[in-house]
Image (cartoon, rainbow, N blue to C red):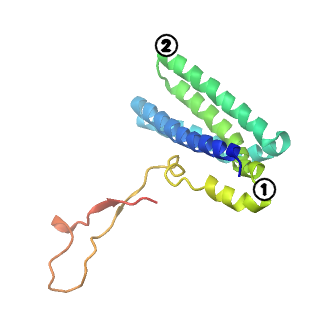
Amino acid sequence: MNRAFYAWLAGASLSTFDDAAVFFALGWAATGIAPHVAGLVLTAYTLPRAVLLLAGGVLGDRVGPRRLLLSGYSLLAVATFALALTVHFAGTSTALLLLIAFIIGTVDAFTLPAAGAFPRLFARDAELSKALRLASSDPVLRPLPSSPAPLQRRPRPSSSYSPSAPNRQGPAGQADLRIVIQ
């Protein structure tokens, strides 16, 4: 594979991290207004992605993934700059957060399929499986846009069972809480 693929891979990984940071920041800012606003803002971010994802794939096939990605990322840069200026001069409002979440979610719906097609543009047939493995192998960054890891109750492991053995759970018979990374 050529250097351009690795440059794209670095940029795609950075973009994934950026998506996670923006998703977290929107939720955080909305929570500062009210808890229900956070739910609305995060829904305004994810709903267009779910609804328009197929349309994004069709558009990417018609205009080409490069053109679509450049247009989408340019629009996101302009929207982010406008958001920063608006927050600096006017402050944060529910309407502003809903609008920017909807814009980012909509643009993501159109750019995600194009980004998924990009490894094919760089790799020959013999290198395609390696390119696809590399493109999907950032285990640290890929899960970030999803919700935080769930807390699950797990009993402490015991090496042997004996009816006379003391209770291995915590005080008051509660199992300890552990974060389980998916």
- In the drawing, does residue 149 fall left or right of residue 176? right
> Which residue shows up at 76% across the image and 47% down it?
57
Would you call the spot at circle 1 few (<14 residues within 10 Å), some (14-19), or many (20 or more)?
Answer: few
Q: Secondary structure at mark 2?
A: helix
The vertical placement of 178 against 35, above or below, is: below
Q: Which residue is mark 1?
A: 124
Which is closer to the viewer, label 2 or label 1? 1
> Which residue shows up at 63% across the image and 59% down it?
133
- Residue closer to the observer: 172 or 118: 118
Residue type marked 1:
Arg
The vertical placement of 58 against 86, above or below, is: below
Q: Residue furthest front?
A: 2
Q: Which residue is mark 2?
A: 89
Residue 7 x/y as whole percent:
64, 42
| Alpha carbon distance from label 2 to label 1 | 50 Å
- In the drawing, does residue 1 fall left or right of residue 23? right
- Mark nearer the N terminus (2 vs 1): 2
Residue 66 picture quarter: top right
- In the drawing, does residue 169 fall left or right of residue 42? left
Q: Residue furthest top?
A: 89
> Which residue shows up at 49% across the image and 40% down it?
39
- Residue closer to the observer: 122 or 163: 122
The vertical placement of 151 against 169, above or below, is: above
Would you call the spot at circle 2 few (<14 residues within 10 Å), some (14-19), or many (20 or more)?
Answer: few
> Which residue shows up at 76% across the image and 62% down it?
126
Residue 125 picture quarter: bottom right
- In the drawing, does residue 87 fall left or right of residue 61? left
Residue 1 x/y as whole percent:
71, 52
Residue 69 x/y as whole percent:
72, 37
Q: Secondary structure at mark 1?
A: loop
Residue type marked 2:
Phe
- Residue closer to the observer: 167 or 36: 167
